[in-house]
Image (cartoon, grey):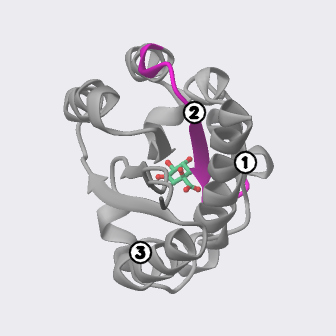
Amino acid sequence: MAQASSATRRILVLNGPNLGQLEFRPADVYGTQSWTEIAAQISEQAQRLQLTVSFAQADGEGELIGILQRARASQDAVVINPGGLSHTSVALRDAIEAFSKPVIEVHLSNVGAREPFRHPAITGGAASGVISGFGAFGYRLALVAVAELLAAQRA
Ligand code: DQA
């Protein structure tokens, strides 16, 4: 009898404030790709890795926290770019910690090489790992990291 294939793992890609407005942000920092183009590349990568990916974006801290709280029941991991909240939000950090499953934080830009106010890694300190400075490719790298972490859980 054929073995039932193991369920696909579900990954939420969650963007924070101003990441829904990439086309109006400095292209030398954030690149020239629209989020629609980036999301299509992420979806292709997810397919290759046999992950099921969904997307969300919110500009508000409370909204992001609510999305993360609800995601705990339905998602196996989260890839998050908290935008400017990365450097300020203890509440979002606490929500990442409470998610209790793999969370990879992504930054399009290399935040460590930018203004000092972007150096505090408040939310990143609660993530499984942080990928910063690879542009949109960072989201695809994050999916590879997620696939590895989930596979290690199963081993
Ligand atoms: C960002 C870096 C943050 O400092 C900034 O506020 C953003 C985007 C990035 O992807 O490089 O909104 O998270």
Does residue 109 appear in the picture of this structure? no
- Between marks 1 and 3 in the image, the one whose residue lies nearer the viewer: 1
Q: CA distance from mark 1 to mark 2?
A: 10 Å
SS of the residue under disc 1: helix
Checking the image for residue 102, the label placed there is 2
For the residues carrying marks 3 and 2, which lies nearer the camera in this image?
2
Disc 2 packing (10 Å; few <14; some 14–19; many ≥20): many
Q: Is residue 41 left or right of residue 142?
A: left
- Residue 66 percent location from the top left of the image: 21, 27
Q: Mark 3–mark 2 contact, CB under 8 Å?
A: no
Q: Position of residue 57 (x, y in %)?
A: 28, 53
Question: Where residue 39 is drawn, which disc sits there?
Answer: 3
- Amino acid type at circle 1 is Glu
- Between discs 1 and 3, the one toward the N terminus: 3
Q: 102 left or right of 62?
A: right
On screen, residue 63 versus residue 155, left or right, reads left
Q: Is residue 2 visible?
A: yes
Asked whether 101 falls inside the magenta stretch, the response is yes
Q: Nearer the viewer, residue 103 or 83?
A: 103
Above or below residue 21? Residue 118 is: above
